[in-house]
Amino acid sequence: MGARGPKPLPANVHRLRGNPSKLAFSGLADSVDPAIEVPGVPRHLWPEARKEWRRISQELVDNRLISKLDRAALALYCQWWAKWVWAEEQFARAQRIATARRQAHIDAAVARAVTAALAAYDLDHADPNAGAQALEAGKPEIAPPSPGADTTPALPAPDPIERQAIADAAAAAAALDAESTWTGGDGLMIPTPNGGTMYSPHWVAARQAALYVDKFLSSFGLSPSSRGRVSPSNNRQGTLPLDGGGPSGGFGDL
């Protein structure tokens, strides 16, 4: 059965961090003692990764937690950071689109239901019989209907308040039905071709990237859980290449 717990840090990392674990000097004597220095920026990094490199490098220098040996680890962190930002933005966009489509589905169903309900209501109150209305009103100028004429009382005119109540009821019922039958997902859960649902690929990518971001933050002592286990290095170089070029690049490669 393998050993449990986190993997031990290399001796050079202990030295860079000031040997917070108080290891014996004999175990660290043969290791390198890197100077605090910002490594050159890999040119393949995404634009968002370069922005994060610029930001985090200054923080690492200020806290004496960076050397040229950390170039690969810092590049991996920044690239995973950029992928996390991209995935989160795509996931948020997918949620906005799903919300808009769902609302459009509901609005269309409500419009159809209200139109049908009002058409039926208006039909029930259509074709008033002017002669019968006048007769019922007792107006003498209207002659009584001739024998055989239709004397069916006219239907009452549409009541605006009743009409609006019918429209509101139809809209509420249609909205509930449309919500219950919506199958387009919500951005987090999306439909599959076989009629099921699955997690959004953008959400999955963001979750995976966040795990790697946390991993590399911990390696630099920049997460809340790892901060207390890291001590800064006192091995400063004369001038930090934050603005110049040269082999180390600094921020000149950005």
Image (tube, rainbow, N blue to C red):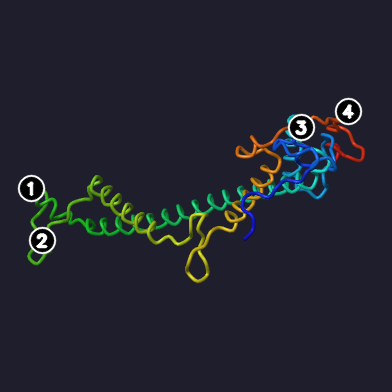
Say which label, 1 or 2, has the lower sequence index: 1
Residue 47 x/y as whole percent: 75, 45
Which of the two discs, 3 and 2, sits closer to the camera? 3
Task: Please state which amino acid type lies under the numbered disc 2.
Answer: Thr
User: How many numbered marks does the figure carry?
Assistant: 4
Relative to 88, is 179 above or below? Answer: below
Task: Please state which amino acid type lies under the numbered disc 1.
Answer: Gly
Quadrant in which the N terminus is drawn: bottom right
**Foreground of the two, 145 or 44:** 44
According to the image, label 2 marks what residue?
Answer: 151
C-alpha distance separating marks 1 and 3? 102 Å
Q: Which quadrant of the structure image shows residue 237?
A: top right
Say which label, 3 or 2, has the lower sequence index: 3
According to the image, label 4 marks what residue?
Answer: 238
According to the image, label 1 marks what residue?
Answer: 138
User: Which label number is shown at residue 64?
Assistant: 3
- Secondary structure under tag 3 reads loop
Position of residue 95 in the picture relative to residue 63 (left or right): left
- Secondary structure under tag 2 reads loop
Say which label, 2 or 4, has the lower sequence index: 2
